[in-house]
Amino acid sequence: MQSDYYIIMPENHFAERAAAREAARRRERLWAALQLGGWLILCYAASGVGALATRDAATFYSQLSLPSWAPSSSVFGPVWTVLYALMAVSAWMVWREREEDPDNSAIKPALQLFGVQLAVNALWSWVFFRWHLGALSVLTIIVLIALVSTVAVRFYRIRQAAGVLLVPYIAWLAYAGCLALVAWRRNPGVL
C-alpha cells in the first residue's frame, strides 16, 4: 500500500530523502565543529601550560635590554592567540582527511609530530621566561622552527591549506628566535 502512495505522490518520497540528507549534513557539520573544538582545546591547553611560566613575563621582559625592533609585551598575547587558532584549524583540517588515508600512513605521523611541536612550544616559555636560560631558549626555538617547518610540509602534502596556515607561525618563530638571540647576547647576567 505504501508503494502505491509513492507512485501517486512521488514528491513525498523525494522530500523525505532530501530531509534525511539534510539531517545527515547537519550531523556531519556538528561533528566537524566538535572536532574543531577539540583541536582548539588541545592547542589552547598547550598555550596555558606555557602561560604558567609567563605570569611575571611583562616585568622580566621590561628589564631586558632589547633592540629597537622588539615589540612591547602587550603584543605577544594577541599574536599567540591567533597563532594557536591557526594551529588548531590546520591540525583539524589534516584530521578531517583521515577518510582519504584509511591506514593513516601520512596523517598519524604528521599529527604526532604536531603534538611534539606543541610540547616544545610550551617548553620554550619555561626555558626563557621562568628559568631564564638564554642559550637553551635559542636552541629550543631553533628546534621548534625545524619541527613546525616539518609539520607544515607534511600537512601541505595532506592538505595544502593546512600547511599554508602554519606559515605565519613559522614567520613569528623566526622573528622570536632572532629576538631571543639578541636578548641573550645583550643580557648575559640575566639570560
Image: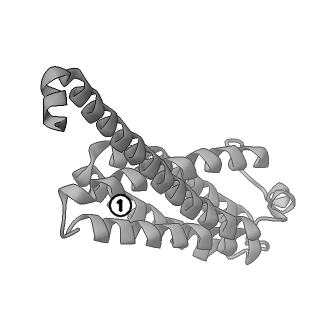
| Image quarter hosting the C terminus | bottom right
Residue at 43% x, 52% y: name it.
Answer: 31
Residue 160 higher or lower than 134, as above or below: above
Residue 134 higher or lower than 8, as above or below: below
Question: Residue 84: where, in percent of width, then height?
Answer: 56, 53
Front position in the image: 87 or 167: 87
Residue at 22% x, 53% y: name it.
Answer: 157
Quadrant in the rendering for residue 48 = bottom right
Front position in the image: 11 or 122: 11
Colour approach in the figure: one colour
Q: Is residue 84 left or right of residue 4?
A: right
Quadrant in the rendering for residue 121 = bottom right
Image mark count: 1
Residue 87 higher or lower than 125, as above or below: above
Question: Residue 119: where, in percent of width, then height?
Answer: 53, 72
For the question of whether residue 87 can be seen, the reply is no
From this viewpoint, which residue is outermost toward the front? Answer: 1
- Label 1 crowd (10 A; few <14 / some 14-19 / many >=20): many
Front position in the image: 127 or 45: 45
Q: Is residue 53 left or right of residue 152?
A: right
Residue at 45% x, 73% y: name it.
Answer: 116
Question: Residue 18: where, in percent of width, then height?
Answer: 28, 31
* Residue that numbered label 1 is attached to: 151
Residue 24 higher or lower than 66, as above or below: above
For the question of whether residue 153 can be seen, the reply is yes
Q: Is residue 69 left or right of residue 154?
A: right
Front position in the image: 70 or 185: 70
The amino acid on which the numbered mark 1 sits, given as a three-letter code, is Val
Give the SS element for disc 1: helix
| Image quarter hosting the N terminus | top left
Question: Residue 12: where, in percent of width, then height?
Answer: 26, 26
Residue at 80% x, 62% y: name it.
Answer: 57
